[in-house]
Each structure stands twice: as C-alpha cells, then as structure tokens.
Amino acid sequence: MTNELPRSAKRCTRCQPRLWPVAAAAVMVSLPVSADFRPLDDRDMGHITGQAGVTIELETKLDIGRLSWRDEGTLSVNDLSLSGHDGSVLDNLQITLDIAGEGEVLEHGFSEIARRANAGVLDASDPDIADALARYSVAGEFGKQFNSGDLVIHLGAVNTGDPTSLDDYLKAIDFQLEVGSLQTEGSGGSTTMFSDVLLKGYVGPTDLVIRNGGDATRTLSNGTVVSGSELQLDTHFEVADGSLNWDVADLIFIFNFAAVGIEGLQIHNRRGDDTLGHFGMAHATARLSRGTSAVSGKEGLSIHNVEFRADIDMPVFRIGPESIGSVSFTDFAITDTTLMVYGH
C-alpha cells in the first residue's frame, strides 16, 4: 500500500486538499487495529478494580414546596427546606464510595478519631476516644472490615478544622431542617398534625452499607425471614436548637401530644449510662431488606435491628398557650424493634 493518490485525483489540483484527509482516514480504518487489544481475565481485573473508590465533595440546598402521598386521602409535607444554619448552603460534605474487596477495611463511624488517637494527636485516655481506638482498630488499619462486593458509602466532612480539636470535628457539618406543616386531607377536610418545625444541629459520621449477601437468607428472633443482602444505616447527629407545634398526634406508646408547643429542643447524648463511644451525639441504626413475615406470611420491606439512643431536652413545653415548665428524657432508647411494611 502506498500513499499515492489515484490518477483522477492528481488531475484535479483543487481537489487534492479535500481528498488527502479522506484517503488518510481510509488507510487508518483498514489497519488491523484490533491487534493491540486483548480481553482481561479475572487476575488482570483484580489489579484494576477495588484499588480506589470515589470521593464526592457536595454543596447543596434543598427546597420542596409540597411532598404528597395519596391513597384514599392525602398526607402532605409542606414547605420543606434543608440547608446549613440560618438558610446558608449545606456544605463541607464529603461522600466516599467504595466496593469492598474480601476483608477490606474501610472508613466507618468514628474511625477518623481512632486514627488521630493512634497518631498521638488526640488524648487516648479520654473514655470516648479510647473506645473508638478499640472499636475501629482492625489489623493495623482503622475502620470496619467488609466482605467482597459490599457497597460502602461514608459521609464525613471535607474540612474538620484543628486535628487536635474534637469540637471542630463534631461540628464540621451544620444543618437546618424546616417544615411548614404536615397535613392529612380527606373528604371531611384537612388536619394539621405538625407545624412550624425548625431543627438546627450537626451531622456526625454517617454510613450506608449495601451488604452483598447474594441469595442467602437469615431468620430474625421473631421468625421473620430476611434477605442476607441488606441496606445498613448507621448515623450520629445532634439537634442543638429546635421548635415545633405538635397540633394533633396520638402516640399510643407515650401519650397524646395534641396542642403541644416545644421550644429550645435539644437531642444529644451527653448524660446517663449509655454515652460511651457516642461523643455526645444521638445515635440511630437500622437494617432494611426484603423479608417474609412469620405472622402473616406477607412479603415486603423488613426494617429490623432498629436502635435509637439519645437524651432529649425540651426547656419550654407548652400545652395550649401556657408553658408547664421543662421536660427532659435521659437514656431515651428504642431497641429490639422490627417492622414489616407491605401493601394492602
């Protein structure tokens, strides 16, 4: 093969500049380019995948005018807003995503605190720090060990301030949640359940893990059979200031909070007997997967291993227009809770 153009092309000098690129492209297409490519076997892929995850730095502000669920009636969340304090941008968020290899140790919970304590940056004699150091130390690394194919999503802060300051770390991500009202509507009219909800606080380490359990199943203590592949949620947070009007709400397991107003609400974990390892933050965890109820035989969404631990302070507690003083809970704990959710 030569680079010489056809004679017809030579006879047209004006055409040569246009035909040269066409001829060059034809030559390149005709070359055996596939000779440089080969399929990768599993050993080769092992050197490519699983070596590094993805990090996302996020700034956002969320506003929803109306969020509704309709059945025979309607349940609506009105004027919802999620932002930083005082309506600023919710920022300083860092999300890391990893697909774990077998036995891989990845960031989880307060593992960053354990890493700093091991480096001598934080005082390991502090009970919370000592607990983190013991809990998150795994074979010379810091985090939690996972199985092959687990999807691990960890939410932390981009900038945690002074590495020697626990307070900087715990308050690195501030949030503000506002809800205008929560209403139910039907043929008989509408009812406002909650209104003027405002929560300001801080987000601690939060983890979402999708466990790769394949087709395996397990049986819970109540007999419900659930999938071994499940979504695991684990989060720490603090509400530093909050207020709301609890207009109509019949909580059977506590009492009727109708016509209640709350100001100065705080949700934390700074007192009582279960503070260890939580650094003063409230803690919530849950597991979600496909399940089959042992009672009804219905298949649906199983929410299990639910746990919530916190101290709750309500310094201004109003019934109607009058304050009755303050109300507080110490070692408020919801444990051993399982729910099955399905349509009817």
Image (tube, grey):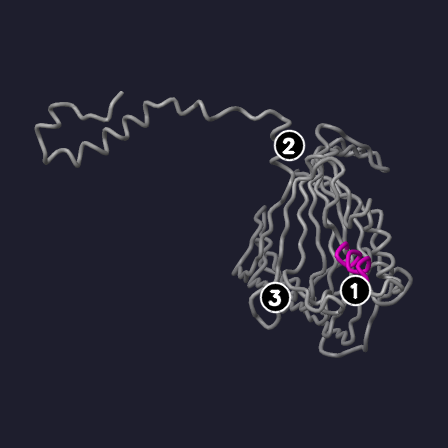
- Horizontal relation, residue 68 to residue 215: left or right: left
Image coordinates of residue 165 in percent, x first then y, are 75, 69
Checking the image for residue 178, the label placed there is 3
Q: Which residue is mark 2?
A: 46
**Residue 179 within the segment the image draws in magenta:** no
The residue type indicated by label 3 comes to Glu
Image coordinates of residue 305 in percent, x first then y, are 80, 45
* Disc 1 secondary structure class: loop
* Disc 2 secondary structure class: helix
Which of the pair 17/270 is nearer the observer? 17
Query: Disc 1, disc 3: CB below 8 Å?
Result: no
Query: Disc 3, disc 2: CB below 8 Å?
Result: no
Residue located at (82% from left, 71% from top) = 327
Question: Alpha carbon of mark 1 to alpha carbon of mark 3: how far?
Answer: 37 Å
The image quarter in which residue 94 lies: bottom right
Image coordinates of residue 24 in percent, x first then y, are 26, 30
**Quadrant in the picture for the C terminus:** top right
Question: Alpha carbon of mark 2 to alpha carbon of mark 1: how far?
Answer: 36 Å
The residue type indicated by label 1 comes to Val
The residue type indicated by label 2 comes to Gly
* Disc 3 secondary structure class: strand
Secondary structure that dominates the magenta span: helix
Reply above or below: 178 against 232.
Answer: below
Q: Which residue is mark 1?
A: 121
| Region in magenta | 111-120
Q: In the rendered structure, which disc, 3 or 2, sits on the residue that comes first in sequence?
A: 2
Residue located at (67% from left, 57% from top) = 156
Query: Disc 2, disc 1: CB below 8 Å?
Result: no
Question: Alpha carbon of mark 3 to alpha carbon of mark 2: how far?
Answer: 46 Å
